[in-house]
Amino acid sequence: MKFTISLIMLPFLLTAQIKTIEPVSFSEVTITDNFWKPRIDQVATTTLDACIYQTEVKTARIRNFEIVGGSREGKFEGIFYDDSDVFKALEAIAYSLKNRPNPTLEKKADEWIDKIAVAQQADGYINTYYTLNGLDKRWSDMSMHEDYNGGHLIEAAVAYYQATGKRKLLDVSIRFADHFDSLFGPGKRHWVTGHQELELALVKLYKVTQNTKYLDMAKWLLDERGHKYAQGYTWTEWKDTAYAQDVNPVKEQTEITGHAVRAMYMYTGAADVASLTGDEGYMNAMKTVWEDVVHRNMYITGGIGSSGNNEGFSVDYDLPNEQAYCETCASVGMVFWNQRMNLLTGESKYFDVLERSLYNGALDGLSLSGDRFFYGNPLASNGKHFRREWFGTACCPSNIARLVSSLGNYIYNKSSDALWVNLYVSSQTKLNLSKTTVSIEQKSNYPWEGDISFSINPEKKSKFSVMLRLPGWATGETVPGDLYRFANASNSVITLKVNGKDFPYTIDKGYAAIVRDWRKGDVITLSLPMVVEEIISKETVKANEGRIALQRGPLVYCVEGADNAGQAWNFIVPENTTYISKFNAELLNGVVTIQANVPAVTIGEDGLNIKTQNKTITAIPYYSWCNRGSNPMQVWFPRKITDIKINY
Ligand code: FUB
Ligand code: ZN
């Protein structure tokens, strides 16, 4: 029979081709890592307790649900998006229950879920703010986060169902999604979400239910933007169309604008929709906007959204250090979006950026004690910043908690005959590759050391590809684009061996491709050069003029007063400085420090003169600063004395 491809079939074929790469779920990955396992355990034992205490005891978030459900009397207390924090905490609990089963925690989650279910209206609507302040006003103001709250409900429900098999919350979320669908969509009312989130959540709901209605809704929501459909509606909270990424249709967008978290969530949903539908308009727009973010608007920490005014982007290259807003949630959003971009394209550069945001901008949001948080993550401090127990707008704590506890989602991708290793995190997983079951064990002391081993154990001899990400920082590319570059290209090389012998790998989209017949007991060893690199930023970034930053492996470093006699702003780092790095198990839960002997400026005893004398400065990983009280801190160090800001 002759087989021809019709134009109508093309999108489906594209979809089939694109969809072949998928992430290995956190539920199939056991993390054993020296760096991450203690953080994941700490989220389970400490961070979640803090979230539960704040959500249930210190604030009225759970009480609002009880009042709606009738088990308590009272009025709504809090902010209209507070329900979302309950859902995000539940999502973090779900991942955590899989990582570390805990019947008491599960009982608490079930209790919350019962209260949420009772608070759902008969038509599927769920929102404590409007239910207690007048249901007649619901869905009248696109900026009031009803859909944002609903999106977080869906994400929590999917995670809880996947972790526990319990579907009560999933059913609540399906009723909410169906309620939304009954009001909005083609031929019904327009809706431009004030805070994007529902798009990516609906994709998750589609994946778990396989009901294409939810994928269509996600795409419809994205298609709604950029047509001024919001005009004529009340927008209490919205500032302008650029703030809300509503100037142009998403498919025609080329520049990043506005609120950073909203943008990240929207582009995550758009990349998801592009992967699942093969829609080239979304694919191309995503790539262009991503370049605008990474090439012109991203901090070296992978943080984004420099301006506090709009909690987002300002103009290109406006990256102030001390005033950097860099919300923790925006870095978490960078992790989401870059994962989806990698799935869409197969290119490793998206994981290079993801790794940067994860280990630096996002992880900085969580204290080493697990119960203090940063909302903003500046790259310089005069010593007045401090970590807080909670915030009035408390989006960041549960966001970092859900990210850390779902880390297993980001380590591996798979197809029918290939495994991609995206993150170097010691872990075990078992997969079907080329029709056989393969156990994989990854081991390293990353990010402190660059030697990584993989035991590959197929049940029977089999040919498949193992693709190892060659991080940009190890191949001489600081960050994709030219915003940042290494001052001196290091001569260190990457080595890759299979069973102790050099393997002649090819490079495919930034991954070392090892294609061969694998047998039980095969071992890959990858050695990445962990050297201290000086980074220079493009001259157009005025804040970093005449300055360098330090990076070792994936970690960006800073100098904090606590290690430097209370000072972090009084030294210069001239060219040809020598750096010594060493692991200090006693410091900050164990970190590699970088030390250098450099000129430091002090004010003479007479108060009339300044003098310069050499001192040893100690730099620590950026994520670990401000864990010993408030301290001055800097990431970008001056080369010359004229660039020292002596005030600090
Ligand atoms: O609007 C909900 C959350 O509050 C946003 O994601 C954060 O940026 C903060 O504005
Ligand atoms: Zn936040």
Image: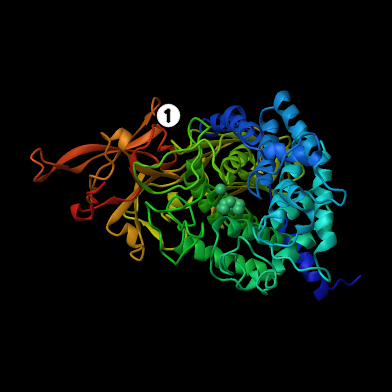
Q: Give the camera-side residue of 7 and 214.
A: 214
> Does the Cβ of the disc 1 residue fall within 8 Å of ligand 2?
no
- Relative to 269, residue 429 above or below: above
Residue 566 appears left or right of 606: right
Q: Residue under label 1, please give it.
A: 590
Q: Position of residue 438 (x, y in %)?
A: 70, 37
Q: Secondary structure at mark 1?
A: loop
Q: Give the camera-side residue of 399 and 53.
A: 53
Q: Position of residue 211 (x, y in %)?
A: 84, 55
Q: Position of residue 631 (x, y in %)?
A: 34, 38
**Image point (35%, 66%), residue name:** 540
Query: Residue 578 occupies which quadrant of the picture?
Result: top left
Residue 453 appears left or right of 5: left
- Relative to 94, residue 348 above or below: below
Furthest residue to the right? 1
- Residue 601: tell me if it is visible: yes
Q: Position of residue 184 (x, y in %)?
A: 80, 64
